[in-house]
Image: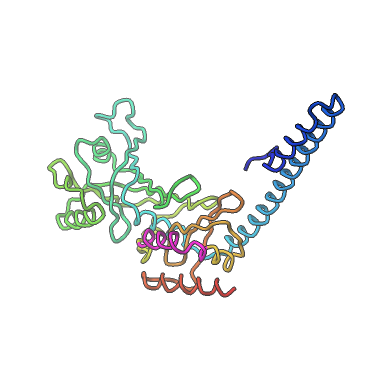
């Protein structure tokens, strides 16, 4: 927000008119004109400062209410949110330990590279890695690795991301390789190169745990048993079409829902992702941006149920 002097068109016109009337009236006229100009500018400045103070108070009250709401809002556990981020993405940063034969100066250091992956039914990432890649050579010597993945809607460090650590090993079993290939091509339908002779299938096994940042002031660690105890979220995969439709056609309904369910009068509301328990939104108030969780009234276990929940909440908000 711009702060300081801001002369409006009306003020500028008044000042210009006053100045013209003062021309030719000698020093007294010029002094009067200068006085009027200064008074007008000072009044405008005071008005802007008062507006800024009012905006600040409004935003402070908004933040207080948002904090109260977010503290009680139903949301996924850290483990389930970690699993959701892994399942709904297809690329991440794989950090391996520089190998002793070809890593050179970075031998023994964490070495990161962007890779494609697909998660299996248990949430374990599988990779198609080339023998020519350094990270392949790294894991063949030392399988310890970490895959870092950002949430589907990630734009800044205020958004979610997870780092999953474990052992990345070559898949030896033929049936398991077939399943890995099928899952990978489903997530990467144009990846014809996986059948090239220098590519092999790998999977992160023996997961050690993960670290997650679910957004501002929401971070923690998830144990291996907690992560392995999760299941795939049944509706997270529909986030893009559902959110796109709501943002394009029902922005007013989202604003009304924020008021009805969170007690917040927002200037705008954008739905960013969904899960079985609710919606994750981005809201604005007086030029400032915040994250908002809007839980469903009851869990949605399929796409039809998501629509029913959104319709139910829209009607309840409209009735206010």
Is residue 315 positioned above or below 283 on the image? below
Q: Is residue 211 magenta?
A: no
Report the span colored magenta: 238-254
In depth, the one of 224 and 74 nearer the eye is 74
Q: Is residue 242 magenta?
A: yes
Instruction: Tell whether 243 sits left or right of 140.
Output: right
Q: Is residue 229 visible?
A: no
Quadrant in the rendering for residue 235: bottom left
Residue 205 placed where, x, y %? 29, 52
Quadrant in the rendering for residue 48: top right
Residue 252 placed where, x, y %? 52, 63
Q: Residue at x 78, y 28 (%)?
A: 23
Residue lying furthest left: 197
Is residue 49 positioned above or below 188 on the image? above
In depth, the one of 95 and 70 nearer the eye is 70
Q: Residue at x 60, y 62 (%)?
A: 69
For the N terminus, which image quadrant? top right
Q: Residue at x 35, y 56 (%)?
A: 88
Is residue 177 positioned above or below 19 on the image? below
For the C terminus, which image quadrant? bottom right
In depth, the one of 4 and 91 nearer the eye is 4
Residue lying furthest front: 24
Instruction: Tell whether 116 sits left or right of 267.
Output: left
Provide the major secondary structure of the magenta segment.
helix
Instruction: Tell whether 149 sits left or right of 281.
Output: left
Residue 32 placed where, x, y %? 84, 32
Instruction: Tell whether 236 sits left or right of 44.
Output: left
Q: Residue at x 27, y 30 (%)?
A: 100
Is residue 56 positioned above or below 2 on the image? below
């Amino acid at each position: 927000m711009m702060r300081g002097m801001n002369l409006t068109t009306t003020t500028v016109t008044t000042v210009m008119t006053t100045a013209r009337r003062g021309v030719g009236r000698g020093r007294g006229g010029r002094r009067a004109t200068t006085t009027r100009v200064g008074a007008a500018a000072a009044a405008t400045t005071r008005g802007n400062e008062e507006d800024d103070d009012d905006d600040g108070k409004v935003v402070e009250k908004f933040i207080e209410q948002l904090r109260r709401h977010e503290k009680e809002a139903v949301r996924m556990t850290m483990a389930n949110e970690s699993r959701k981020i892994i399942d709904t993405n297809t690329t991440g940063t794989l950090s391996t330990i520089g190998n002793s034969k070809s890593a050179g100066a970075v031998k023994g250091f964490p070495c990161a590279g962007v890779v494609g992956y697909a998660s299996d039914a248990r949430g374990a990432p599988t990779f198609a890695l080339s023998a020519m890649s350094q990270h392949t050579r790294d894991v063949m010597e030392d399988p310890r690795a970490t895959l870092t993945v950002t949430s589907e809607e990630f734009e800044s460090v205020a958004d979610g991301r997870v780092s999953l650590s474990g052992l990345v090993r070559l898949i030896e079993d033929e049936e398991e390789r077939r399943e890995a290939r099928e899952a990978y091509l489903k997530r990467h339908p144009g990846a014809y190169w996986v059948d090239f002779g220098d590519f092999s299938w790998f999977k992160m096994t023996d997961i050690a745990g993960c670290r997650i940042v679910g957004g501002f002031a929401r971070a923690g660690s998830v144990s291996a048993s907690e992560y392995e105890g999760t299941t795939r979220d049944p509706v997270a995969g529909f986030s893009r079409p559902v959110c796109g439709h709501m943002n394009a056609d029902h922005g007013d309904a989202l604003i009304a829902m924020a008021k009805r369910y969170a007690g917040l009068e927002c200037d705008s509301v954008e739905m960013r992702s969904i899960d079985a328990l609710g919606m994750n939104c981005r809201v604005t108030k007086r030029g400032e941006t915040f994250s908002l969780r809007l839980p469903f009234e009851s869990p949605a276990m399929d796409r039809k149920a998501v629509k029913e929940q959104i319709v139910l909440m829209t009607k309840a908000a409209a009735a206010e």
